[in-house]
Amino acid sequence: MSLSIIQIVLLSLIIVYLAVMLRKIQPDISLLLCLGICILIFLYILQSFGEIREFLQYITGGMNLQYIGILVKLLGLAYICEFASGVCKDAGYSSVSGQIEIAGRVGMILISLPVIRAIIETIYGFFGG
């Protein structure tokens, strides 16, 4: 069964309310509730990537799909790092959260290197380099 964004938001608000109420009594259960809703939202996002990929393939037609693949990887990495960083912050590990964010930025640079190389080669081509 597929959930709509409205259902996800409403369920998230209910879970967060319950987690806040349980935080002082049962902090472990509170954290598990928040982690559970985060995983549910993450699965919803993953499900949506298939539709996004199909749309991008449709609109690009004969274009080089390598660059579309890079774009999808960048988006995926951004969502994964944001998710993991948020969970760490909520658990009280802000230093780990910060390191995840830095690792995500470095990963994005590494993934985008082929695009940067292509841009530099194009510029050199224009100027006869």
Image (cartoon, helix red, strand yellow):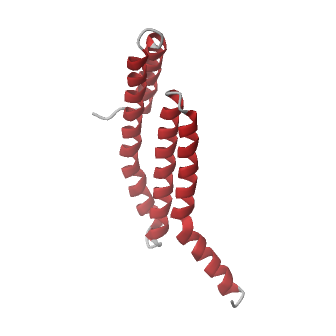
The quadrant of the image that shows the C terminus is bottom right
**Residue that lies at the very extreme toward the bottom in this rendered image:** 128
Instruction: Please identify the quarter of the rendering in which residue 125 is found.
Output: bottom right
Q: Is residue 17 above or below residue 125?
A: above
The residue that appears at 44% across and 73% down in the rendered structure is: 62
Q: Is residue 87 above or below residue 67?
A: above
Image point (49%, 67%), residue name = 67
Q: Quadrant of residue 124?
A: bottom right
Q: Nearer the viewer, residue 125 or 84?
A: 84
Q: Which residue lies most toward the left here?
A: 1
Q: Is residue 50 above or below residue 61?
A: above
Tell me residue 113's x, y (percent).
55, 68
Provide residue 90's location: percent of width, then percent of height.
51, 28
Q: Whole-percent x and y of residue 63? A: 47, 72
State left or right for residue 90 relative to residue 45. Answer: right
Quadrant where the image shows the N terminus:
top left
- How many numbered discs? 0
**Residue drawn where x is 39% and y is 22% of the image:** 33
* Residue 45 sits in quarter: top left
Residue 102 pos. (x, y %): 58, 49
On the picture, is 126 further left or further right than 70?
right
The residue positioned farthest toward the right in the image shown: 127
